[in-house]
Amino acid sequence: MKQEEHSPEKTRVKPRLLEYYQKEVIPALIKKFNYSNPLEVPRLTKIVINIGVGEGGDDQKAIDAAVNDLAMITGQKPVITRAKKSISNFKLRKGATIGCKVTLRRDYMYEFFDRLVNTVLPRIRDFSGIPSKISDGHGNFTIGLKEQIIFPEIDYDKIYKMRGMDITIVTTTDKDEEGKEMLVLMGMPFSKKI
């Protein structure tokens, strides 16, 4: 009798936030916006995390440290980003290394969003919520963080330099109101200030 091999995909547990989205958020959004079809409900497409390294072309150690930090935060290998054109005012040459980024999709995206909302954002000192005006006008939202040390995966004693990062949350909707409502239902702490 042949034993079945267990692949990692079969034993993988569905992310907690994805289950919550399917059971709670979708019905709430259908009720609020009167969607006729469940496929009209906005959903997350991807989350892109980007770290810029100003002195990147000159300091390879800074690039390696940023790549290492981003890999620890996301659990995925970052892609190194390069300048698309030369800008003399910034002493930037075309093709020079300027940072790194990671694109998260599917289960990894939901797991990262869950950690961001429930673990990382509450660790920010004097945190009073995410500003309401972080959207691009097409249903996507970008959050800027000043320090990478608010992530529990980063060891404060081993960081090379304090770095900020941009986290872009891409949704399927093109209306900011619907995208924001979805994020609020998923736990994003928006500021009450206007």
Image (tube, rainbow, N blue to C red):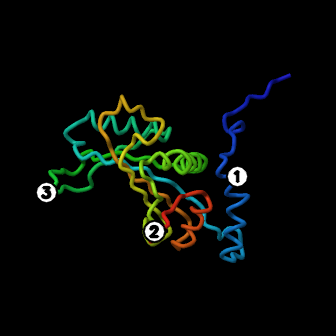
95 sits left or right of 181 in the view: left
Q: Among all residues in the image, which is located at the extreme top? A: 1
Nearest to the eye among marks 3 and 2: give it. 2
Secondary structure of the residue carrying numbered label 1: helix
- Residue under circle 2? 193
Quadrant assignment for the N terminus: top right
Q: Residue 171: which quarter of the image? A: bottom right
Q: Among all residues in the image, which is located at the extreme front? A: 126
- Residue under circle 1? 19
Q: For the residues marked 3 and 2, what is the alpha-carbon distance in whole angstroms? A: 37 Å
Q: For the residues marked 2 and 1, what is the alpha-carbon distance in whole angstroms? A: 31 Å
- Residue under circle 3? 89
Identify residue type, mark 3: Asn
Secondary structure of the residue carrying numbered label 2: loop
Q: Are marks 1 and 3 in contact (CB under 8 Å)?
A: no
Q: For the residues marked 1 and 3, what is the alpha-carbon distance in whole angstroms? A: 49 Å
Q: Mark 1 or mark 2, which is nearer the start of the sequence?
A: 1
Q: Are marks 2 and 1 in contact (CB under 8 Å)?
A: no
For this rendering, which residue is in front, 97 or 120? Answer: 120
Identify residue type, mark 2: Lys
Residue drawn at 43 percent across, 60 percent down: 142
Question: Residue 108 location in percent, x, y?
Answer: 57, 45
Question: Residue 90 location in percent, x, y?
Answer: 16, 54
Secondary structure of the residue carrying numbered label 3: helix
For this rendering, which residue is in front, 36 or 164? Answer: 164
